[in-house]
């Protein structure tokens, strides 16, 4: 399932963004043929980006999250928008490492040491860019640090992906708890204790889904919210504000890939037309192949020449 919700506590101390993203992560796994470790790493970033997308004010606002570490996973790049559309890729979808001592997939080891960059395109003249050093490469901790260092925002990010023995996605999801400006001081303490004692979010999702036969997706995510925040004192009881959705969606198209071909430049494009007489472009996000025959390339070359012509005048 793919379901999200936004909630707020009674005292208006914090806001909650919660998502079950099992279907989205499984779609990414199928498209990219990821190993269990790559599914976990990419799945966490996809879910984190999807949750951050829910924080965007407008549907057309976009954000890009890039994990660039020195580990064997290579780069992980994900984009999300305010409508809940998410897409992404991992450079090495076959990455494998031994399990950690606690039996978990070693996402931090796969990502390695490096940087996390977040680019937010909010329709302004310049996009907002925030960049931090990775804390652990475990994704949730890195995003928590990003909010604090780059946005001066006290938030806590928990992300998790559980894999079936047949390598399909068993459960995936995540949560951002965002402290609000007028947060009551006791709420911070109560939340810290809650998070310290909380089971991994993927386990909570797995258990909730298993107990929810016949229930709607809305009812299931309500159950999950209730389960997570049940230990809090009454004054910080959470109330749902709205249901949302995050889902896999690649918006690539012939038109978009035409722009890529044009950007190659007239010189290289002429060479491709002469030597290969065709070109094939593959969308990095979803693997869709786009074929360009000679005629099509020639028309794009013309467009490219016109553009270079105008830029000469400028
Ligand atoms: Zn695509």
Image (cartoon, rainbow, N blue to C red):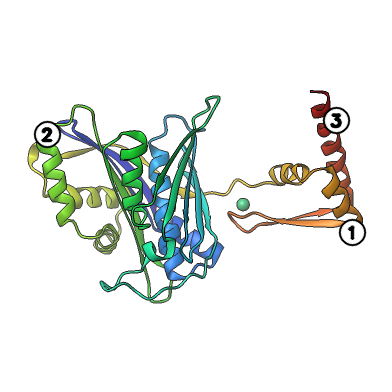
Q: Which residue is mark 3?
A: 309
Camera-nearest residue between 23 and 62: 62
Mark before the other along the chain sequence, 2 or 3: 2
Left or right, 314 with reference to 162: right
Can you tell which of label 2 and label 3 is closer to the viewer?
3
Question: Residue 184 in the image: x percent, y percent?
Answer: 13, 31
Q: Secondary structure at mark 2?
A: helix
**Quadrant of the image containing the C terminus:** top right
Say if 202 sits above or below 94 in the image: above
Tell me: 247 left or right of 146.
right
First along the sequence among labels 1 and 3: 1
| Residue farthest toward the right in the current orientation of the protein | 274
Q: Nearer the viewer, residue 291 or 244?
A: 291
Q: Quadrant of residue 307?
A: top right
Q: Are marks 1 and 2 in contact (CB under 8 Å)?
A: no
- Kindly state the secondary structure of the residue where label 1 is placed: helix
Which residue is denoted by mark 1 in the rendering? 275
Vertical placement of residue 282 versus 305, above or below: below
Can you give x and y, in whole percent of width and height, for residue 164 in the image? Answer: 37, 72
Residue at (15% x, 33% y) in the render: 10
Residue 168 in view: no
| Residue at the spot of label 2 | 185
């Amino acid at each position: 399932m793919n379901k999200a919700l936004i909630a707020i506590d009674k005292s208006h101390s914090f806001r909650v963004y919660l998502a079950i993203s099992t279907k989205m992560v499984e779609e990414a796994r199928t498209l990219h043929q990821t190993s269990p470790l790559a599914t976990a790493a990419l799945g966490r970033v996809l879910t984190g980006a999807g949750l951050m997308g829910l924080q965007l004010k407008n549907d057309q606002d976009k954000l890009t999250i890039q994990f660039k570490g020195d580990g064997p996973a290579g780069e992980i790049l994900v984009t999300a928008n305010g409508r809940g559309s998410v897409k992404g890729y991992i450079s090495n979808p076959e990455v494998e490492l031994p399990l950690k001592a606690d039996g978990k997939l070693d996402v931090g080891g796969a990502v390695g040491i490096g940087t996390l960059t977040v680019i937010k395109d909010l329709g302004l003249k310049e996009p907002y860019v925030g960049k931090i050093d990775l804390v652990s490469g475990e994704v949730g901790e890195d995003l928590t640090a990003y909010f604090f260092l780059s946005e001066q925002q006290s938030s806590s990010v928990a992300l998790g992906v559980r894999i079936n023995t047949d390598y399909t996605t068993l459960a995936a999801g995540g949560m951002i708890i965002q402290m609000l400006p007028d947060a009551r001081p006791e709420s911070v303490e109560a939340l810290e204790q809650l998070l310290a004692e909380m089971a991994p979010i993927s386990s909570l999702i797995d258990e909730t889904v298993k107990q929810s036969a016949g229930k709607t997706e809305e009812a299931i995510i309500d159950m999950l919210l209730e389960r997570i925040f049940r230990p809090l004192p009454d004054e910080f009881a959470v109330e749902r504000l709205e249901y949302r959705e995050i889902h896999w969606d690649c918006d690539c198209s012939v038109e978009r890939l035409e722009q890529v071909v044009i950007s190659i430049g007239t010189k290289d494009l002429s060479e491709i037309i002469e030597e290969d007489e065709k070109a094939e472009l593959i969308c990095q996000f979803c693997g869709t192949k786009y074929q360009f025959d000679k005629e099509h390339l020639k028309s794009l070359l013309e467009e490219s020449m016109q553009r270079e012509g105008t830029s000469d005048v400028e």
